[in-house]
Amino acid sequence: SAVISQKPSRDICQRGTSLTIQCQVDSQVTMMFWYRQQPGQSLTLIATANQGSEATYESGFVIDKFPISRPNLTFSTLTVSNMSPEDSSIYLCSVETGISYEQYFGPGTRLTVT
Amino acid sequence: AQKITQTQPGMFVQEKEAVTLDCTYDTSDQSYGLFWYKQPSSGEMIFLIYQGSYDEQNATEGRYSLNFQKARKSANLVISASQLGDSAMYFCAMRESPYNTDKLIFGTGTRLQVFP
């Protein structure tokens, strides 16, 4: 298994500002995923982050709005830029360990944009 | 395109009873994996159980079992002996390959409430 931590756990931000969310894993992992869960909705993948390469974004998500860094095999950041109230969501980091089929999630970052 | 359908927005079950949460999926792939996650009000996603498309037996993990009917493309979660702590959102998800390195597609979820 993998133990994943995220910072911050929650934040309230003003529109127009940016927030960087950190994801730390207790072991080296190849693939890291960033998901968004809007209020009352299911999870939607934002992007997949591999170490040493550019993140791959899903349809509807762009790098200028959600830049991602993946400097090493245990860490990634997601920035939510120029925030609007529509960005209010839970943002979840997820990893696959490459050992088993399981995909693990971090505790999430609950973001509210006012 | 892959799709996951959960038709039960909410379910109620009495403590100690069993409950089945429905999940159907649509894919043209022969090789895929099916997952169930639990999301308490805290927001974390807790992995419950996994079923690979080539697994002949239904997966079980403690009080959780997955009723896998491949021909009907269904992967229902059965929770036996429900506990008050089982109250949460439950999401069914699919990955195109039973192996790693691919995203999960999630259903809309079912909110389970367990009452005494």
Image (cartoon, rainbow, N blue to C red):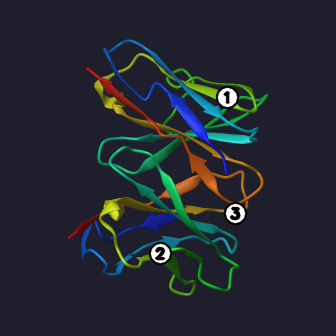
Chain that bears disc 3: B
Q: Secondary structure at mark 1?
A: strand
B104 vs B76: above or below = above
Instruction: Please tell me the numbered disc located at residue B63.
Output: 2
When asked about the image quadrant of residue B104, the answer is bottom right
Measured in 3D between alpha carbons, the distance from the residue under mark 3 to the one under mark 1, in whole angstroms, is 25 Å
Measured in 3D between alpha carbons, the distance from the residue under mark 2 to the one under mark 3, in whole angstroms, is 26 Å
Discs 2 and 1 lie in a common subunit: no
| Place of residue B33 in the rendered image (x, y in percent of width and height, measured from the top left) | 63, 67
Measured in 3D between alpha carbons, the distance from the residue under mark 2 to the one under mark 1, in whole angstroms, is 34 Å
Nearer mark to the viewer, of 2 and 3? 2
Q: Amino acid at mark 2?
A: Arg
| Place of residue A82 in the rendered image (x, y in percent of width and height, measured from the top left) | 41, 16
Q: Amino acid at mark 3?
A: Ser
Instruction: Please tell me the numbered disc located at residue B97.
Output: 3
Q: Circle 1 is placed at which residue position?
A: A75
Chain that bears disc 2: B
Q: Residue at x 76, y 29 (%)?
A: A53
Nearer mark to the viewer, of 2 and 1? 2
The quadrant in which the C terminus of chain A is found is: top left
| Residue nearest the observer in this picture, A65 or B91 | B91
Mark 1: give few (<14), some (14-19) or many (20+) Cα within 10 Å.
many
Q: Residue at x 20, y 70 (%)?
A: B116
